[in-house]
Amino acid sequence: MEFYKLVEVMKKLRGPDGCPWDKEQTLETLKKTLLEETYEVLEVMEEKNHEELKGELGDLLLQIVFQSEIMEEKKYFSIDDVCREITEKLIRRHPHIFGDIEVKDSEEVLTNWEEIKKLEKAHKHRESVLDGIPKALPPLEKAYKIQSKIKKFEIEPSNIQESLNRIDSLYEDFKKNINENNEEKIKNKYGEILFAMTNFAKLSNFDASEELRKVIKEFEKNFREKEMYINKNKRGE
C-alpha cells in the first residue's frame, strides 16, 4: 500500500543514515510548514486544479506522517494509532450509519455529534461550548465558529432581519464615533461590525472567510491586469 511506503520512506529519512534536515525537525519547527501546506491546499481547491490538488494533498499528508514518526520515536504513539483513533471516532459519532439510531436530517446529525463528543474522555473536562475552538484560528474563522457554537443560546440574532438590524445599528454608532474622532471606539465598533457580519453569513448559510477569499482573489486579478496596463504605457508599448 502506497501509504505505508510513505511511512517507511519517512522512517528512513529520520533514521541513523537519513537526511540531516529531516532528522533535525521537531513538532515546533514543523508548525509553520503545516500551516503553509494547509493554505496551499486551500489555494488549489479554489482554483479547481485537480492535478495540483493531488500533489498538495500529498504534501499535507506528509506533515501528518512526519509528526507521527516524531511521536513514535518518543514512544507516544504511531501513525497506526492516529488512523485507529480517527476510525473509531468516525464509527462512534455516526450511530445512524454504524448503529441503530435514526436521524431525519444533517442538523440532527450535528446535534448527535456534539452530544456524543461530550461523553468522550478527551472532551469531558470541557465546561463551555466554546472549549475546543482552536486559539490559533484566524479571527474571521474563529468568529464564525463561535457564532455556530452559541446558536442554541439565542444570544446573537437568530434570523436575517434581526441580523441586519444589528448591523445597521452598529454602523450608525460607527459613523458617530468617526464624526467624534474617537479612535478607540472607532476600532472597537469596526470589530463589532465584522462580528455581526459573520453572524449574517452564518444565518445565510455561507462561509464569511470563503467569500472574502473570493473577493481578494478577484481584486488581485483585476489589480494585476491594471498594473500590467500601466507598466506597458510607461514603457510606451
Image (cartoon, rainbow, N blue to C red):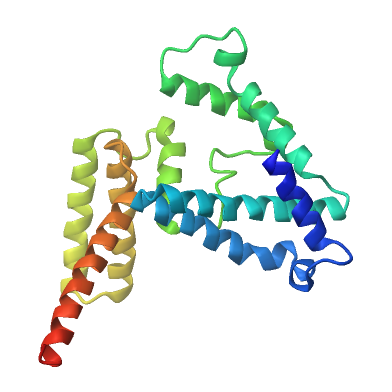
Q: Percent from the top left, x then y, of residue 28?
A: 70, 65
Q: Is residue 77 left or right of residue 46?
A: right
Q: Name the image quarter holding the C terminus.
A: bottom left
Q: Which quadrant of the figure contains the N terminus?
A: top right
Task: Please tell me which residue lies in front, 131 or 50.
Answer: 50
Residue 17 lies left or right of residue 89; in this view the side is: right
Tell me the residue at 69%/42% (across/down): 3
Can I make out residue 112 in this image? yes
Q: Where does residue 94 sit, x and y in percent of width and height? A: 58, 20
As drawn, 180 above or below 79: below
Spot occupied by residue 223 in the image (x, y as percentages of width and height): 21, 72
Q: Residue at x 17, y 51 (%)?
A: 168
Residue depicted at x 19% and y 74%: 180
Decide which of 51, 15 is in the foreground and name it: 51
Extreme residue in the bottom direction: 235
Please tell me which residue is depicted at 16% across the width and 58% down the height of the picture.
172
Q: Is residue 130 above or below residue 188?
A: above
- In this rendering, the count of numbered labels is 0
Toward the viewer: 138 or 151?
Answer: 138
- In the image, residue 25 sits, relative to residue 90, either above or below, namely below
